[in-house]
Amino acid sequence: MAQLKYSPCRRSIPDGAPFAEVFAEGITMQASDVMEGGILAGRTAPSREIGRDPGGVRGQIMEAAGEIAAVAADLGATPAQLCVAFTLTHPSVSTVLFGASRMEQLVDNVGALELLERVGAPRLRELLDPFWADRGVVDPEGP
């Protein structure tokens, strides 16, 4: 299993050709940082330290958070559900890491399964394509 940053905004490495070869061999992905430290879930001023910022695109991600929230609302979902559902669209994802400090957050995040089933992976990927912040910025080969 490879643990990789994977979200609507950070996907150049997991969706790139080099890892496609790895995934074709049966390696799976553990998606991490799916909400960019809470930014994509609506916490635009996180109180905790967020991980590395490959490609220096966090500013773009912060700008996209409101638009991603609007897409979620149009789908009758929360931004967190949309982010988790997006990660589940990747065929090699085996686990998704997300933080939940309250039971409501856990229940909300699990609602991503219903969203994915209702909307479908191709449509989710299409709706979130404009928010791919590290496209052309981060080398799919990795750092």
Image (cartoon, rainbow, N blue to C red):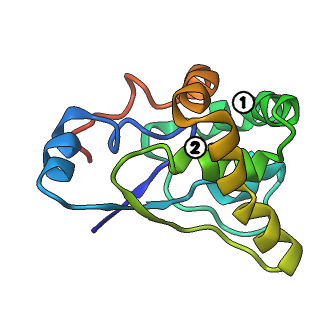
Residue 133 percent location from the top left of the image: 54, 29
Under tag 1, what secondary structure? helix
Considering depth in this image, is 107 or 114 the residue closer to the camera?
114
The quarter of the image holding the N terminus is: bottom left
Is residue 59 in view from this perspective? yes
Who's the residue at 57% across and 22% down the image?
A: 126
Name the residue beneath numbered marker 1. 64
Identify the image quadrant of residue 7: top right
Total label count?
Answer: 2
Left or right of 110: which side holds 55?
Answer: left
Vertical order, 32 against 86 (above or below): below
Q: Residue furthest front?
A: 118
Mark 2 surroundings: few (<14), some (14-19) or many (≥20) residues within 10 A: many
**Distance between the alpha carbons at the discs numbered 1 and 2:** 15 Å
Identify the image quadrant of residue 20: top left
Q: Are marks 1 and 2 in contact (CB under 8 Å)?
A: no
Vertical order, 19 against 128 (above or below): below
Considering depth in this image, is 53 or 81 the residue closer to the camera?
81
Looking at the picture, which amino acid does disc 1 mark?
A: Ala
Residue 107 percent location from the top left of the image: 80, 70
Identify the image quadrant of residue 101: bottom right
Residue 24 percent location from the top left of the image: 15, 48
Residue 74 percent location from the top left of the image: 86, 28
Closer to the chain start, of discs 1 and 2, is 1
Looking at the picture, which amino acid does disc 2 mark?
A: Phe
Considering depth in this image, is 137 or 102 the residue closer to the camera?
102
Q: Which mark is residue 86?
A: 2
Who's the residue at 52% across and 28% down the image?
A: 122
Is residue 39 in view from this perspective? no
Considering depth in this image, is 31 or 52 the residue closer to the camera?
31
Under tag 2, what secondary structure? helix
